[in-house]
């Protein structure tokens, strides 16, 4: 166990590092991080932050439907941002919807990395026909927009499964669809990093020492290529959230009974021109803020880990 003095020393070193200085010297990045952390906090603790349970039909009251925001005539203090056509509190729906959007974003990116990293490392390290097969598959997939691939996988899954299971497995299928649609970019970055690392002396020394190939890949190559892919993964989370929102907006993503931000926007779009603008406006603003903050953090990480862009 580390002593308190050692922990204090490591903390001081982290605070004095170039990365911390770069972060603190960028007010835009600090603001983006605060916004992103606020969304994560709200999503994690939505059950305790609001008394409303928008996805529980037994707790809804149709008499409370189409209530405007509290600052408009007819608004109620218990529904700060108003309600939708089912009487769901918009603020509570955004909190719970953000949880689903972040869940899909994080796990789909994790799946993409889980697929792309090993394939990219194998392609860059072994070369030859392995490299040709993996990269040609990646090149073909990159010519197709990820949302179309996700739509195809989602459609095949819905066709193959009984209709009674659609809502139950909607989120796992969505994560699988987006994850499979997005792996090529991680594979290409990992391949490029692997091709650079395999020519270095420490890899040659490991081969001379007859280290197992798997040990070289996992112990030497992987730690050196995972950094750039994590930068891409940060931006990839924002892209995955947008894809999920688009699919949900089209009605093939998260079911209406457990709406994400995309589903909330789709529901509100039906009433946009009838005067109930708040049903779609506030979820849209939440989606924009969430994606923008994650993108800004990703841009900062890219600059930090790529000195040529500083």
Image (spheres, rainbow, N blue to C red):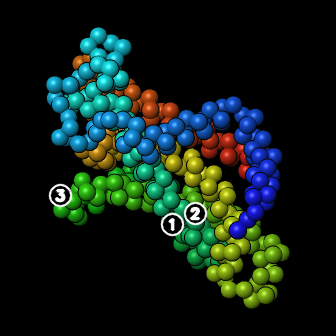
Q: Is residue 241 left or right of residue 208?
A: left
Q: Residue at x 58, y 49 (%)?
A: 234
Q: Residue at x 43, y 43 (%)?
A: 45
Look at the numbered discs 3 and 1 and tell me whether their residues touch, using CB distance below 8 Å: no
Viewer-nearest residue: 8 or 38: 8
In the rendered image, which residue does mark 3 sit on? 163
Residue 258 can be seen, yes or no: yes
In the rendered structure, which disc, 3 or 1, sits on the residue that comes first in sequence? Answer: 1
Question: Measured from the top left, where is residue 212 in percent x and y?
Answer: 68, 86
Q: Secondary structure at mark 3?
A: helix
How far apart are the alpha carbons under marks 1 and 2? 8 Å
In the rendered image, which residue does mark 2 sit on? 187
In the rendered image, which residue does mark 1 sit on? 115
Viewer-nearest residue: 272 or 9: 9
In the rendered structure, which disc, 1 or 2, sits on the residue that comes first in sequence? Answer: 1
Q: Residue at x 49, y 43 (%)?
A: 40
How far apart are the alpha carbons under marks 2 and 3? 35 Å
Q: Is residue 186 left or right of residue 58?
A: right
Look at the numbered discs 1 and 2 and tell me whether their residues touch, using CB distance below 8 Å: yes
């Amino acid at each position: 166990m580390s002593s308190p003095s050692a922990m204090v020393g490591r903390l001081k070193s982290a605070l004095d590092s170039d990365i911390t200085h770069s972060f603190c010297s960028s007010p835009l990045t600090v603001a983006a991080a605060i916004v992103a952390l606020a969304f994560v906090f709200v999503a994690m603790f939505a059950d305790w932050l609001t008394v409303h349970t928008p996805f529980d039909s037994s707790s809804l009251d149709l008499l409370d439907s189409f209530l405007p925001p509290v600052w408009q005539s007819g608004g109620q203090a218990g529904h700060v941002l108003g309600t939708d056509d089912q009487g769901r509190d918009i603020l509570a729906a955004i909190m719970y919807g953000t949880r689903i959007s972040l869940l899909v974003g994080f796990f789909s990116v994790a799946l993409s990395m889980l697929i792309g990293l090993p394939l990219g490392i194998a392609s860059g390290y072994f070369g030859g026909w392995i490299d040709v097969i993996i990269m040609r598959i990646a090149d073909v997939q990159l010519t197709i927009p990820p949302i179309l691939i996700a739509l195809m996988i989602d459609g095949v899954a819905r066709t193959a499964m009984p209709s009674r299971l659609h809502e139950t497995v909607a989120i796992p299928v969505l994560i699988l669809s987006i994850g499979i649609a997005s792996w090529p970019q991680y594979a290409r970055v990992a391949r490029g990093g692997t091709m650079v690392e395999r020519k270095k002396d420490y890899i040659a020394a490991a081969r001379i020492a007859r280290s197992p190939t798997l040990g070289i890949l996992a112990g030497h190559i992987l730690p050196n290529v995972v950094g750039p892919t994590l930068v891409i993964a940060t931006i990839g989370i924002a892209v995955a959230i947008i894809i999920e929102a688009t699919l949900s907006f089209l009605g093939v993503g998260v079911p209406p009974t457990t709406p994400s931000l995309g589903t909330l926007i789709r529901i509100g779009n039906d009433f946009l021109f009838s005067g109930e603008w708040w049903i779609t406006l506030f979820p849209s603003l939440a989606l924009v803020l969430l994606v923008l903050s994650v993108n800004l953090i990703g841009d900062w990480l890219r600059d930090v880990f790529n000195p040529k862009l500083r």
